[in-house]
Image: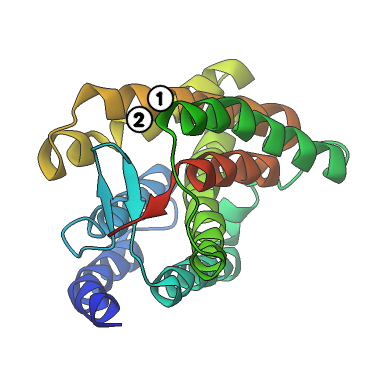
Amino acid sequence: MDALLVYFGRLIPALALFTAWLALTPRTQTSHRLLVLIIAFMFTRDLMTPSGLWSLGGAEPLRFHHDPGVLAALGLASLGVIALLARLLPEYWRSVVGFKGPRLGGIVMGIAAGCVMGLPLRLYLGLEVGSLTWLAGFALLALGGNALEEVLFRGMLQGSLEQQMGLCKAALGSAVAFSACHAYLAFVLTDIGWPILLFTFIEGLLCAFVRLKHGTVPAIATHAVIIGLLGAPLG
């Protein structure tokens, strides 16, 4: 668990400042406050790279920490943050919209959309399957971590944009923002560059249109399945 101690030791002081920034921003400045949340998430996600919790690039382009306990802890922490957002920021939570239409059908469509993008890439890359224990921890991270990302980008951001522009423009806006928020990861933390931006734009666009048609929870399923199919243990 040393990796978690390093990660949270770096993360907590920064999150304290983000929390203070959010608290000091008037509630009437809804766009500003949402931007604070998104920047805080970006820092939280991108800090995983120098902390050794995941790695991008190579034959297995998306690799995660080998300890399933570490992955499970990160997934549970993400779910805890979602619960806090729902309780403490109801003005944003109203934009999330969990489902549009039948719930089971929406989840099935979300999983199917994730397989359409993730499964061909996995087969092309020939990724090996990790141990069952690792897969259990990784599944929790894929669900929890990507749920938090989707709540912010597809739930809160896209939901907010829908109130000010057409549904398709809001979906496109959330996809562009999602891809742009991976620029630091693409060009500074790694040297992969534009392929990360292209991948995340297509992924964001797919999740955005799933959210448009079926709601945020199905979009979470889409994102979780894509990452779940592409993830491999970090050696």
Where residue 149 appears, as percent x and y from the top left, is 47, 49
Residue 177 visible? The answer is no
Q: Position of residue 98 (x, y in %)?
A: 71, 48
Q: Position of residue 119 (x, y in %)?
A: 57, 31
Mark-to-mark CA distance, 2 and 1: 5 Å
Q: Residue at x 68, y 47 (%)?
A: 217
Mark 2 lies on residue: 179
Which image quarter is the C terminus in? bottom left
Which image quadrant: the N terminus?
Answer: bottom left
- Horizontally, residue 72 falls left or right of residue 14, namely right
Q: Nearer the viewer, residue 28 or 9?
A: 9
Q: Which mark is residue 4?
A: none
Q: Amino acid at mark 1?
A: Phe
Residue plotted at (23% across, 22% down): 194
| Disc 2 residue crowd, few under 14, some 14–19, many 20+, Cα 10 Å | many
Ranked by sequence position, the earlier of labels 2 and 1 is 2
Residue situated in front as seen by the camera: 29 or 211 = 211
Q: Residue 121: percent from the left, percent from the top?
A: 47, 28
Instruction: Name the residue carrying label 1.
Output: 201
Mark 1, secondary structure of its residue: helix
